[in-house]
Every structure is written in structure tokens, then in C-alpha cells.
Image (cartoon, rainbow, N blue to C red):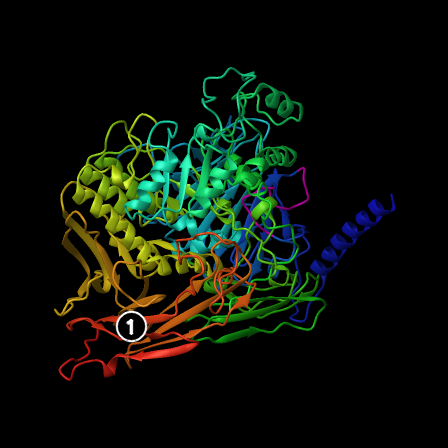
Amino acid sequence: MMTGRLALQGVLRQRLLTLLAMVAVVAGGHAVCADATIVFPTQDGIVVPLDEHNVELAAVKPGWLRLSVFSSNARDGGRVPTPMVSVGHNDTPAFSWWQDDGYVIFRTADGRLVLAENGTTWALQGPDNTTIMLSKKLLSKPSPSSSDLLLHVNRSSDAHVYGCGRLTNTTKVLPLNCSRGLPLVSEFGFLSSFAWSTDGFAMFGVVPDNDARSQPFLNLSWAQATEEFLWQFSAHHPRLDLYLAPAPTLRDAVVLLWNLTGAPGLLPSYSLSFLASRSGWEEPPSISKAVDEFSSGHFPLSAVVADYEWFSPESDAQLPPEGAANFSDFGLNPAVLPGGPKFLQQLRSQGVHFGGVRWPRLGNTALLREAGSLGCLFHEPPRHLRFNDKACREWYTRQLQADTQAGVSFFWNTGGDSAYYTYMYWARAQTNAFKDHIPPTTTTTTTTTTTTTTSTTTTTTSTTTTSTTTTSTTTTTTSTTTTTTTRRTSTTSTTSTTSTSSSSSSTTVRLHPQFHNKTAQAESPIVQWRALRTRAGEGQPEPSSASCNGTHRRPFSLSNAFTPGIQSLGNVATTGRIGSSWDDLEAAAGDIVAYLMAGTAFVSVDIGGNSQGTVPDTLLVRWYQLGLFTTVPRSSSARTSSPHFPFDAQTPPAVDAIRAAMRLRQRLMPTIYAAMVWQHVLLEPMLRPLLFEFPNDAEAAQTATQWLLGSGLMVAPVLSSSDQVQVYLPVGLWFPFTQTPTSSPTQGIAGPTHHDVVAELADIPLMVRAGTLLALQDVGSSPSPPGLLTIYVYAGRNASIAVVEDDGKHYCGSGRVTTFSWNDDTLVLSWTRTAASSGGGGGGGGRVGDGDVTGEAEANSVLFPAASPGYIVVQAVLWQNGTAPIQSHARNIGLSGFLDFATLMSPNSHKRTL
């Protein structure tokens, strides 16, 4: 009783302070009009009452604002509960608000929301108060008789929208821009309520989940109308949270999405090598036979994946609603995994992990009764589990634990379209089934200490009460930013007159009493946001370095769809069940780019597709060459077709071409692994559509089948039976990638241009941007010093790359980072190496100290063989326009060093600049 009375008194006191402040005369002599709308403070913002609805303007995380619409019967604000949004108690940035001439202005360091008190007009403004979006209407109905609502968001007539997701049940390469969206999961891809407009802002819509019903979507959609976007939400759930962020580019918008929903997870290193997946392992060849053939044929292999046959001799697809008494939902099927745990242990000793396909339903009658008694089953479709309930997830976790303890390393989830959040909650339950998953913690501290050139910006706050400090240190040429803010307070202040401008008009706004939750920050550049949360298990953040003990396992799984936020669980989106034809191959390339634009962070395709019969050799080779430049290379085949393994090609040239492509992937692993780590730590995208790097290039925006690894290595796969490929090269100088330096001068190609490439069967069209460093490792193809690391230098601009060495399995432990920097003026490649360190970030993961390997004693062929000292010797190859490539001598890496190419060049050589 006393607690409730005190809480009520606190609410009344807060509202009284608000009323007093609104009628106070401040230093500037201005006062709020007596007839101004009464605004109610909330935890993260303010509620503005309208006639039939209330609107909340709120701060969320750095970069994001929230506009929420809900019933006028509710006064309290707060966001819609959703597993997609990752916001902690102390994440809300500083904000202030005031009223002026019939408008309510809500401000953070990253932008402002302006709302007319009568609800007719609203606007989104940038941090410089420039109007990005101005809508002359807030709410309406689709029709007079409709109970749904429409939220109006203005757009310019020539605006394009990207990032809405992709359904993959077509053999056509679809345009990358989109005109509508909704949150939807499917066996054939996904659609999203995230979108970025070329007008310069990102949108992300959330409504309450109807968790009592089975439906693969949320009751929310948006569509592009004449000079506006219309967000429609159901009257059954009359609340919409629209997250809004000023975002000049699509890359900014995707980084913001990760900041809001969770940083991409840190994948285990084995997931980046090659996964041999197949439906039908009960038929020859057996897993043992296939593993032996991979080994004898010198094809890299890090995991095998089996369909339902790994736990059951038969599918549950045709079972009645009550299931079958003898059906096996869990456990290891000895017909496919002879010896059970011992067999999986033997595979692991060979460097091969095992993953199993899971469906979100049960088939065993007794388990169905047990799950039903707990309320864990949907009524329709029958036998499907309700993962949105935490108790049900915990029950499922307990069922899986015997399998994970037996040696199952990961799961590939399919059929999760029973509910929109099924894949998300399902992945959480599976993560918790591993005994060394990240434990609950209330502290998030991530530190990375590899830098080359840094600058420091400090934002100083006024002297108020308790303060919280967040520190982010970035790698290569980045910045270090420390921001100190105070906890929420209720204060008033005055400022000078500010001009608010838009493309159509300019309005002077007088700033009346301002109400702050914290002392406002001066600036918050997009590139400085480093929300390093990994919501493993039940959404808990990554443990602090102080609590790291080397046992915090990196979660990894695959899913046939994507839900924003699932990337933080190390979940890799596959492009769904696709066919095997040339048209399917071309469409898959477009799907990869569309997925990346939607913020999936990770993507994997079914190499070889799922059509019946045998895939022709040339087509199979091109499938491999495409799939090996996704996040997780993975072959796949339908139960009715032959496996799509490399050695299943019919002719030696095709087998050799696939082997060459797989070995190239292994050689590039230091570059690939580093890109994955820094995506987690710094939110730098690993795989990038051309529009990420070239935001002002209209041609790049329409290039649907090319992408970049990092910022400099362009992938332009062959997508037809012809060996003729036309590659679009944006502005800059581009070098054709080759592993074999010649004595002939290198001829760079100046963009923007379309470049014709002739790609023989074993050729993959790859282009490298001037000012790029690539790190390659030796894979035993030629005699070389042990632990050799080769740096390819593509001259034309300064460049850097930070190579990461760790155990590839854990978040914490010892590890080292070697940062290579290229000075284009002096032609010097220099490097520094961090000594072995424990804890902290993605770089420190427990792989290699200075000569000592830590972690489990098992073979791991992804980065190094077991007991290897890692990279200890470096050489470099310089590629310059107009001169022959120059290869340096090899030298020990040590803690620092350099290679001076100016001393290696012949007297007749000269530097060619852009």
C-alpha cells in the first residue's frame, strides 16, 4: 500500500513540476501560452494528447527517435515490447523538449521531432535542425468504415527506398528498391518493417505481437503512395512504434539498425570455412565416406549438416495432430550417426563439426502432451511450439541439452513461419542448450586496443548528479570518442532563437522553457556509435572483460528467414529453398545483395540449389564460385537429388575449378575473418552492396548482383553459361585480382565504367579497389616458411587492415591483433602487433598468444592447424598501376616492423598516382 501511494505521489509531483515550468517566465522573458497543450513526461520522452489518440515522442538509443501512436485512454508511454529492439536501462540519450506557437519540439543530439499540438503536421529534423521529412498529416483512416489507422510519412517525389527484405520464390533478379514492406517470415526469405529512404532517414515499425495466434507476420505494413509513405496498423492492436533516424546513406541506416537491434554476433571461425549440407544422409555416401573424400581430395571442410534423419528415421511432416508414440524428436539416429557421441567426437578430432536441421514442431505423442500441458503449442498449425513463452523456451532447451552435450555444434532452423518471432525465440532457446553459452550479466564493456591513427573528442557536461561513461576505441584509421552524460533530471533552461529550415520553407522557432532528461550532447556522429551488445541466451549482453574466462561460447545457427535482431545471436540468414538453374543462380546473387541491404549482416546460399537430378558441371562450378563469397559457404541438395559436393562434379576440370575456388577462400581467410570480427566490434559491414560504399552513384544503387568484401574486394560472379561478364566499376582505380604476380605491368581500370571480363571455368571475376590491403595465408600450395602471412598492397591511397588471431570459438580469452598500414607517399608497409591479451571484444578470443595455443585440443583447419604458432612471417606484394608487381622478401613479424618498397623498386620504376 505504501509503495503504491509513493509511486502515485511521484507521478503527481512530476506532472506538477511540468505544469509549473510551463507557466514560468524564464530569463529570456518568454512564457508558454496558457492555452498550450499539456504535455506529460514519460520515462524516455513525452506524451502529447490529441483528440482520439496520444502521441509519444521519445529518445531510444544514439541515432534513433521514436514516435508512438496509441489510444487516448492510455497516458503512459513506453515502447512496444519486442525481442527485436535491444535497449538497456541506461541507453536513452540526453533529450530536451519545449512548446512554441502551437508546436511541441523534442530534441536529442541526433535530431528533432516536431509535432503540431493539433496533430496535423509533424516533421523529422537532423542534428543541425534541417528538416529531413515534413508531413502535413499525421493520422487518418484507410476508409470511413475502417478501424485501421494510417500514419503519414512524407517523401519527395523522386525518393527511392531500400532495405525491405526479399522473398526468394522467383527466378527473376528483382530491383533492389522497394515500394512496400511488412514484417514477414517465410521458407522463401523475409520482408521487414525496416526501410531507408534516399531523402535521408531510416524507418523501423513495431506493433504488439498477437502471440496467441499463429501467423508469420505482424499486423503492420507500409506502402508508398503519392509523395508519402503510409504505415497501416490494425485496430486489434492500436499502437504503433515508429523508430526514426536521420541517416544520409543506406550504410548509415544499416549500422543504425544494428545499433538498435543488436550488433552482429561473433561467429565461430569454423562457420566461415565450408559446410557440407545434405538432405538424405541415410543414403550413400555416409557422413564418414564424404568426410574422407573431402580430405583425400584436398577440399576444405569444417562441418557437415544433416536434415531430420540425424534424430529420426522418418519425417514428422505427415503425422496426425496427436503425433506418434514411437516418433523420436531428440537424440541421435544411429543409422546416420553410428556410435552417437563417439562418432561426433571423432569428427571433431578431424576438424569437422556437426550441425542438424530442426523444425519447430514435435512428433512424439508423450512430448506433445507434456508441451501442451505447459501451454507451449499453437492450436494451428498442430504440433508447432510457441517459442515466445520463456517457460516453453526453457522446456525446449532442456530437451536439446542431451544432443548438444553429445557433440552437436549448431542448428539450421527451417519451417519457422508459424509465428513472426519463432526464429528469434527459437535461436535463443537453442543457444541456451549449450553449457558454455554467455551467462546473464548486467555489465557491458567492450574494449579494442588496436589503433593506428586516432583522434579524441570529448563532450563535457555540466556538473549534475550521477554520470555514466561509455568508451569505444576503434581500429585502423578511426576515432576514439568518450561521452559523459548525467542521469535523467528535470530542469529548465533557455537558449537563443534557432532557425528551422526545409526545402520548401523556413520557419523561425522561439525556444521557450526546455525540459531535459540529461545534459544534451554536442554531437553524435554515426560512425562513432558502437553498441556492442550480443544478446545470446535470453537477450543478455556480452560479458565484461573482467568476467571473461575463456568459456563464453560464440553462438551460431542458420535460419531460412531473418528477423531484425537475430543477427546478434550469430544467426545466419539463408536465401531459402531455391532451385538449381542458371536463372536461380542469378536470382540468388540478387537475393544476397537485397539481404545485406536489409541488415542481415550474414548470408548463406544453398550451393547447387535444391532441384531434382544432377546439376551440370559448369553450373555447379559457378554456384560454388558465388557461394564461397558469402558469409557461410554451404552446399545443399534436395533428398531426391545427388549431393552437390565438390567431388560430385562429372569432369576433372570442374572438380579442379571448385577446388581452386575453395582454396582461394581459405587463402583469404585472414581477410574474411578480420572483416567478420570488426563487423561485430566496430559495426563495419563485412559484406557490402555497392551502394554502401558509393552512396551517390546511381548505377551502383541499381547493381544487384555484385558486392564487396570489406571496402575493397569486389565480387562479380559469373551468372550465365557464357564466360563473358560485364562488371560495373564505380569511381576509382580498380585492379583485377590474381594470385600469381607476373613480370608484366599491372593495368588498373579507372571507374566509373563497365568492364568486360572473360572468365574461364576456374576464373572468378574479382576486382580490388586502389587503397586496399588483403591478407592471405598459405594453404600448402607451395613451399613457404611456416606461419607465412602475405599482404597484397593495392597502391593509390593509404590503407590498413587489422588481422585477428584467436581461438575462433569464444568471446573471451587471449589473442592478438596485427595492424598493417600502407603509406602511399613513402611506399612503406608497416605493422604493429598487440601482445597476447585476455578478454575484451571480438579480437581477443583465446586462439593464439605469442607462440602458445589455448582452448580445446582439437584440430581446427580454418585458421591454423592445432599447436601452430600462428602468423610469424610476413611478405608483401605491391600492385601499382603501370608497373610490374613487386614481391618483398619475408621477414619475422615480431611486435612491429616495416617493408620499404621504395628500396625494392628498380631505378626505371616510377610511381603512378590516381
SS class of the residue under badge 1? loop
At a point 64% along the width and 48% down the height, the residue shown is 47
Residue 76 inside the magenta-drawn segment:
yes
The picture quadrant where one finds residue 386 is: top right
In the displayed structure, 485 sits above or below 832; it is: above
- Residue 864 in percent (x, y) is at 40, 58
In the displayed structure, 688 sits above or below 740; it is: above
Magenta stretch, main secondary structure class: loop
Q: Is residue 903 left or right of residue 134?
A: left
Looking at this view, name the residue that lies furthest to the right: 2
**Could you tell me if residue 226 is visible in this image?**
no
Q: Which residue is mark 1?
A: 797
Span of residues in magenta: 73-87
The number of callouts visible is: 1
Residue in the foreground of this view, choosing between 463 and 832: 832
- Residue 92 in percent (x, y) is at 61, 57
- Residue 210 in percent (x, y) is at 57, 31
The picture quadrant where one finds residue 547 is: bottom right
Query: Could you classify mark 1 by the number of other residues whose Cα lies within 10 Å: few (under 14), some (14-19), or many (20 or more)?
Result: some
Q: Is residue 267 left or right of residue 277?
A: right
Q: Is residue 351 left or right of residue 740?
A: right
Q: Name the kind of residue labelled 1 in the image.
A: Arg
Residue in the foreground of this view, choosing between 198 and 728: 728
Residue in the foreground of this view, choosing between 549 and 589: 549
At a point 79% along the width and 52% down the height, the residue shown is 10
- Residue 196 in percent (x, y) is at 41, 49
Q: Quadrant of the N terminus?
A: top right
Q: Quadrant of the C terminus?
A: bottom left
Residue 40 inside the magenta-drawn segment:
no
**Could you tell me if residue 207 is visible in this image?**
yes
